[in-house]
Image (cartoon, rainbow, N blue to C red):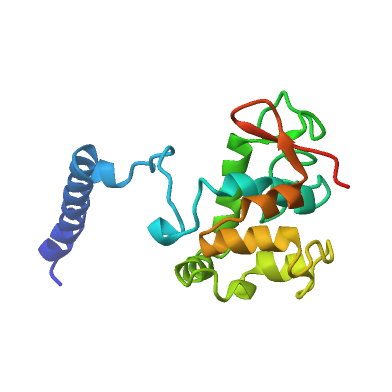
Amino acid sequence: MTVVERRRAPRMGLWRFVATAALVSAGCSTGWLAACSSPDSSARVDPVGPTGPDRASFEFVAPVLSRRCGSIDCHGSRFRNLRVFGFGGLRLDPEHRPDLPEFVTTAEATATYESVIGLEPEILRAVVSAGGAGAERLSIVRKGRGDEDHKGGRRITAGDDSDACILSWLAGDVRIERCNEAGCLVDAGSPDATKIGACP
């Protein structure tokens, strides 16, 4: 390499650097910047899609899960992957205490629904599409029945009101009377709440 070529080499490297920096800067100030922007924080993703379990009928299931699984030391804790909101555990309204009011609000039922469908969305979608067949594939059923190791032990017995409530919801034909018995539900006197009464 001659003396002249050596003198040009650094200038060519600097020229390429300046040109590349200018292109990147121009790209970021135009269309590329949109590709680097943050996601829409209000956007929601439904993990089970249109073939998932019915959200509206979950209103009857949520108090059952709250009663059986939602105590503050179990799934009524923010530190569990399955979070159950409502009486006895997690509350959405900062004015509510775990023990008051004695009902599961519509917002709490929605939060519990989102937690349930987010656990095993593929399996849940398959079970619901099959009319509830194969429900024992779901952790919420196996662990609730005590068929799989569960820190909380058996919370539901196969065939009892709680089990029938959950399985009927998965089958797409919720058995309201079984859910009411399992959750010991009484009318809360509010259109957006169901009170959990004293169980016999």
Closest to the observer, 112 or 130: 130
Q: Position of residue 165 (x, y in %)?
A: 66, 58
Q: Position of residue 166 (x, y in %)?
A: 64, 59
Q: Residue at x 76, y 74 (%)?
A: 148
- Residue 171 shows in this picture: yes
- Image quarter for residue 190? top right
Q: Is residue 39 left or right of residue 27?
A: right
Q: Is residue 38 above or below residue 150?
A: above
Q: Position of residue 18 (x, y in %)?
A: 20, 47
Q: Residue at x 67, y 55 (%)?
A: 82
- Residue 83 shows in this picture: no
Q: Residue furthest right?
A: 200
Q: Is residue 92 above or below residue 160?
A: above
The quarter of the picture where the N terminus appears is bottom left
Q: Residue furthest front?
A: 177
Q: Residue at x 23, y 42 (%)?
A: 25
- Image quarter for residue 95? top right
Q: Position of residue 118 (x, y in %)?
A: 55, 57
